[in-house]
Image: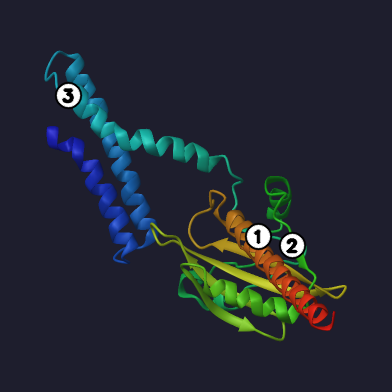
């Protein structure tokens, strides 16, 4: 009976390890971890009942050990459920960037990859900060900058690139269970400036715990910082050149 208190940890470790290494599907790994949490809770209750009846004094400690995964998982679950119940987020809900390569992925076979119309209101209300990024630079330059930035993102893989439409598409694997999400970025001309729209969609599950919105916000924030940094560098270079010119001719 005492050994059962440690079984939840074996199930959780197995779920994470097997899915992370690709031996089982990410959802199967997650389910194995969930089984470990539930099993631990059941063992903890059983141990407490035995202890309350006056047997095995050490079962208090074992019950705590068995219940620990539940104590960690429940707050995480509550936090996840606080996010909007969607798994597809975009900066442009009227004309969302469309997937091309993702339609051919075996994992997406038979799935409707169009952006659900009713998600639009949820995105507006739940993620008001998910907005297009407009940069004072040519769309072609921004498109090249995006491709370079994607290459520096851990776990991001480019699957499709269209220079004429200025769209770039790829996949992102989460670090623990290796869940794969699809993303597509589109650069368009907006009054001589570059407008960047991004869409991110989960392949597994009906909710994403805010992961897609966080990914969009983080990437566009990085892109904006890179743009500001490049402008500052150019400004410093020009200022230094002008100073040298004035010094030489002063």
Residue occupying image coordinates x 62% and y 63%: 222
Q: Quadrant of residue 244?
A: bottom right
Q: Which residue is mark 2?
A: 132
Considering the numbered disc 2 on the image, is that residue within a helix, a strand or a loop? loop
Q: Nearer the viewer, residue 23 or 213?
A: 213
Residue 31 in sight in this render: yes
**Sequence-first disc among 3 and 1:** 3
Look at discs 2 and 1 and give the one toward the viewer: 1
Check contact, mark 3 vs mark 1: CB within 8 A: no
- The crowding category of the residue bearing disc 2, from other C-alpha atoms within 10 Å (few below 14, some 14 to 19, many at least 20), is some
- The crowding category of the residue bearing disc 3, from other C-alpha atoms within 10 Å (few below 14, some 14 to 19, many at least 20), is many
Q: Nearer the viewer, residue 150 or 97?
A: 150
**Relative to 201, is 105 on the left or the right?**
left
Considering the numbered disc 3 on the image, is that residue within a helix, a strand or a loop? helix
Q: Position of residue 172 (x, y in %)?
A: 50, 67
Considering the numbered disc 1 on the image, is that residue within a helix, a strand or a loop? helix
Q: Which residue is mark 3?
A: 59
Image: 218 above or below 241: above
Q: Quadrant of the C terminus?
A: bottom right
Residue at mark 3 to residue at mark 1: CA–CA distance: 51 Å
Q: Which mark is residue 221?
A: 1
Residue occupying image coordinates x 13% and y 37%: 3
């Amino acid at each position: 009976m005492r050994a059962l208190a440690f079984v939840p940890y074996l199930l959780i470790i197995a779920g994470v390890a097997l899915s992370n290494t690709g031996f089982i599907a990410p959802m199967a790994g997650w389910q194995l971890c969930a089984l470990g949490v539930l099993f631990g809770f059941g063992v903890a209750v059983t141990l407490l009942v035995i202890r309350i009846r006056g047997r095995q004094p050490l079962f208090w400690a074992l019950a705590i050990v068995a219940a620990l995964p539940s104590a960690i998982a429940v707050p995480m679950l509550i936090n996840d459920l606080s996010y909007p119940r969607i798994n597809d987020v975009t900066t442009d809900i009227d004309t969302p960037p469309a997937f091309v390569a993702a339609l051919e992925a075996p994992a997406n076979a038979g799935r409707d990859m169009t952006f659900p119309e009713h998600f639009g209101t949820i995105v507006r209300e739940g993620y008001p900060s998910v907005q297009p990024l407009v940069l004072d630079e040519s769309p072609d330059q921004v498109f090249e900058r995006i491709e370079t930035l994607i290459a520096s993102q851990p776990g991001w893989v480019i699957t499709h690139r269209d220079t004429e439409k200025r769209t770039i598409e790829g996949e992102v694997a989460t670090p623990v269970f290796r869940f794969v999400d699809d993303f597509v970025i589109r650069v368009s001309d907006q009054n001589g400036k570059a407008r960047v729209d991004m869409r991110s969609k989960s392949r597994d599950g009906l909710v994403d715990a805010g992961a897609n919105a966080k990914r969009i916000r983080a990437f566009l924030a990085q892109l904006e910082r890179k743009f500001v940094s490049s402008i500052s560098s150019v400004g410093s270079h020009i200022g230094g050149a002008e100073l040298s010119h004035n010094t030489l001719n002063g």
